[in-house]
Amino acid sequence: MKGSKYMLLALLMAVPFCGSAQKKLIFSPGVSYQKEFFGELSIMYAETATNNTGLGIYGPKLGIEMNFSSDSFIYASKLGFEVDVLFFSVRANAVSYIKDGNVDLRLLPEVGFGFFGLANLTYGYGIPVLNYRVEDVSRYRVTLTFNLSRDLWRDIFK
């Protein structure tokens, strides 16, 4: 029974992408809070779906994050995959925080609310992979991002 729930969720998330779709590069800025504020700039190679069954966006992302502290500067490279369908958002990321030349690699699953793939608010938990930890970065985070897709915006509000 438990497995059938996951299959149903996977099918429901795939439905919006069964019709017409377009792949393109989309700029995706954001901000997160994880013990302190970080800004994010990403590029997503997204496939957008706009058909009778729903609206959404999905694809791989490549980006960089950095904090706003001049005392303890931290930046991170980020590689991930995002799926947004109607009001639901899921991401899986690998984030490499760098502080003073030391690397803190984390796997970062995120889940939350979205607005047709244009904006989303997610909660994530960073799972450490290496021994070194950047103490200024919490394992828990809340992220607000925007996927700047003119085509998706036009299709939602036409």
Image (cartoon, rainbow, N blue to C red):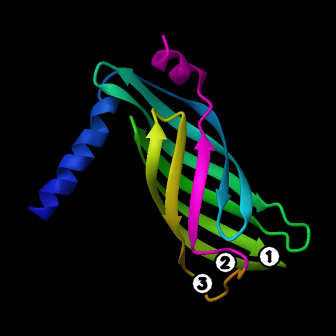
Q: Is residue 90 visible?
A: no
Q: Nearer the viewer, residue 43 or 90?
A: 90
Secondary structure under badge 3?
loop
Q: Is residue 82 left or right of residue 103?
A: left
Tags 2 and 1 touching, CB below 8 Å:
yes
Q: Which mark is residue 104?
A: 2
Residue type of the residue flagged with mark 2: Asp
In three-dimensional space, the C-alpha distance between marks 3 and 2, rounded to whole angstroms, equals 6 Å
Q: Is residue 84 left or right of residue 105?
A: left
Q: Identify the magenta region.
A: 136-158
Tags 3 and 2 touching, CB below 8 Å:
yes
Residue furthest to the top in view is 158
**Residue position for label 1:** 99
Residue type of the residue flagged with mark 1: Lys
Q: Position of residue 110 (x, y in %)?
A: 48, 59
Residue density around tag 1, few if under 14, some if 14–19, many if 20 or more, within 10 Å: some
Q: Quadrant of the N terminus?
A: bottom left
Secondary structure under badge 2?
strand
Which residue is at a point 18% across and 47% down the rendered structure image?
8
Q: Position of residue 140 (x, y in %)?
A: 55, 70
